[in-house]
Amino acid sequence: MTIQETATVFQILQGAYPSWKPNRDTLVAWSALFVDEPAETVVAGVKAFIASDTKGFAPTIGQIKSVIHTPPDQLSESEAWALVYKAIQNGIYGCFIEFEKLPPIIQKVIGDPTQLRSWALLTEGLDTVVASNFMRSYRTELERQRINASLPPDVKLALDVSISKLLPGSELS
């Protein structure tokens, strides 16, 4: 998004939040952090934020990024657990088949098809401890993916380079 497109977004925000008075630095920051986002997407995110805002304060960059990078069809924690629980029902003999039926994010949280088998063999704690741990891990993975989708490409590249230096077998500079 260009500076001019950011200025248009700010006009929308100032119309909805008349007491909000951004300065030139704010304009530059928004433009820089939305540089790879289409202006139409940011405008839609701003409008969605305004339409659902109940607090009356102008949004931050992170709030708008959250709006535009959260898929509308994202499963809730309990919906995700319901799919896992259904897979567990056939998990003793069909863990590999059931694992393949699950969405990729749930597969990532579970980690391995044999985990379904392990959970299927439990006699107690499935509805409490395992469900709670799964939902917490699912929530964490959703947040990690949301944050990753929100990062500008140059920041992602810098983080990837930093992380690769920490991996075994890589040379530290």
Image (spheres, helix red, strand yellow):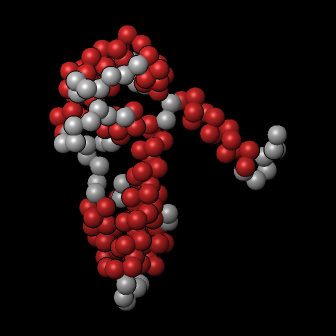
Percent coordinates x, y for residue 124 in the rendering: 36, 88
Horizontal side of 165 relative to 9 (left or right) equals right
Relative to 167, is 128 above or below? below
Q: Residue at x 42, y 13 (%)?
A: 3
Q: Residue furthest bottom?
A: 123
The N terminus appears in which quarter of the rendering?
Answer: top left
Percent coordinates x, y for residue 152 in the rendering: 50, 30
Q: Nearer the viewer, residue 118 or 136?
A: 136
Q: Quadrant of residue 153?
A: top right
Q: Residue at x 47, y 72 (%)?
A: 115
Relative to 73, is 100 above or below? below
Percent coordinates x, y for residue 101 in the rendering: 35, 59
Q: Quadrant of residue 4?
A: top left
Q: Nearer the viewer, residue 71 or 26?
A: 26
Percent coordinates x, y for residue 51 in the rendering: 17, 34
Viewer can see residue 101: yes
| Badge count | 0
Q: Quadrant of residue 60?
A: top left
The C terminus appears in which quarter of the rendering?
Answer: top right
Q: Nearer the viewer, residue 111 or 146?
A: 146
Q: Residue at x 30, y 42 (%)?
A: 71
Q: Residue at x 37, y 17 (%)?
A: 6
Q: Residue furthest top?
A: 4
Viewer can see residue 83: no
Horizontal side of 57 relative to 132 (left or right) equals left
